Image (cartoon, rainbow, N blue to C red):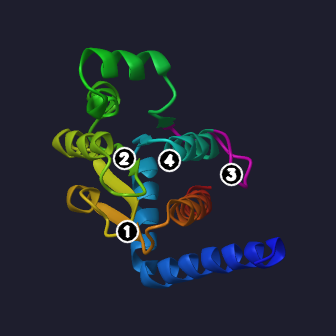
Amino acid sequence: MDLRERVLEVAREAIEVKRRFFEGELEGVLEAARLLVGTLRGGGKVLIFGNGGSAAQAQHIAAELVNRFRKDRKGLPALALTTDTSVLTSVANDYDFSLVFARQIEALGEAGDLAWGMTTSGRSPNVVKALQVAKQRGLRTLAFSGGDGGQVKEVAELCLVVPSEETPRIQEVHITLAHILCELAEDELF
């Protein structure tokens, strides 16, 4: 297969996964928008976390909320729990890597906040544990996952599952979904 055909094949795969997700999870997407807007409208903050590419996406989403997405508007309270290397490494060293997000939620999370975890497999122990701690503390919980949803599907109040086993395709849907949620939040709040 030549490179041109490969590019088109990958693009078709990505489009098909997005089509299946958004057609199958439209009501869940709307519920996620209500969850995000309700949190922000109620004075809560958004705590976002994940590993690897999902960690980068957590930072990306927090930046869209704190700064701006499409509209010039006041900043919205959001924090990526993936950015403080001192906290991450001290928790991983002194306790366990599975607690790197949970400890931050214990310290920063309050009832009425939203804990938003992302894991392409649904099985990341630190994301699962953070969502469990968040629920215990009275936070609302949202998860983005892939495959069969994994453990986060059982833990999160709302879990949106991308119908794919391919990590790149799952991540592409996650960032598209996050952008849609940011846009809907701006539309509702400003």
Residue 147's tag is 1
Q: Nearer the viewer, mark 1 or mark 3?
A: 1
The residue lying at 36 percent from left, 47 percent from top is 114
* Image quadrant assignment for residue 43: top left
Between marks 3 and 4, how big is the CA–CA gap?
A: 19 Å
In three-dimensional space, the C-alpha distance between marks 1 and 4, rounded to whole angstroms, equals 15 Å
Q: Which of the marked residues, 1 or 3, is nearer the chain's N terminus?
A: 3
Q: Observer-nearest residue: 107 or 126?
A: 126
Q: Which amino acid, by three-letter code, is at mark 2? A: Leu
First in sequence, mark 2 or 3: give its number: 3
Q: Is residue 42 above or below residue 184?
A: above
Q: Total number of numbered labels? A: 4
| Placement of the N terminus among the 4 image quadrants | bottom right
Q: Which residue, given by chain and number where applicable, does mark 4 sit on?
A: 54
| Dot label at residue 69 | 3
Quick check: is 72 in the magenta stretch?
yes
Q: Residue furthest left?
A: 136
**Does the residue at mark 1 contact the one at mark 4 (Cβ under 8 Å)?**
no
- Say few, some or many: other residues with alpha carbon within 10 Å of mark 1 (under 14 / 14 to 19 / 20 or more): some
Residue 180: percent from the left, percent from the top?
59, 65
- C-alpha span from label 2 to label 3: 19 Å
Given contact means CB atoms under 8 Å apart, are the residues at marks 1 and 3 in contact?
Answer: no
Q: Earlier in the sequence, mark 1 or mark 4?
A: 4
* Residue found at the very far front of the displayed protein: 1
Q: Amino acid at mark 1?
A: Gly
Q: Sequence order check: which comes first, mark 4 or mark 2? A: 4
Cα distance between the residues tagged 1 and 3:
29 Å
Residue 182 — which label? none
Specify whether 154 is left or right of 189.
left
Region of the chain picked out in magenta, as a range? 67-78
Say which residue appears at 56% left-offset and 76% top-offset: 18
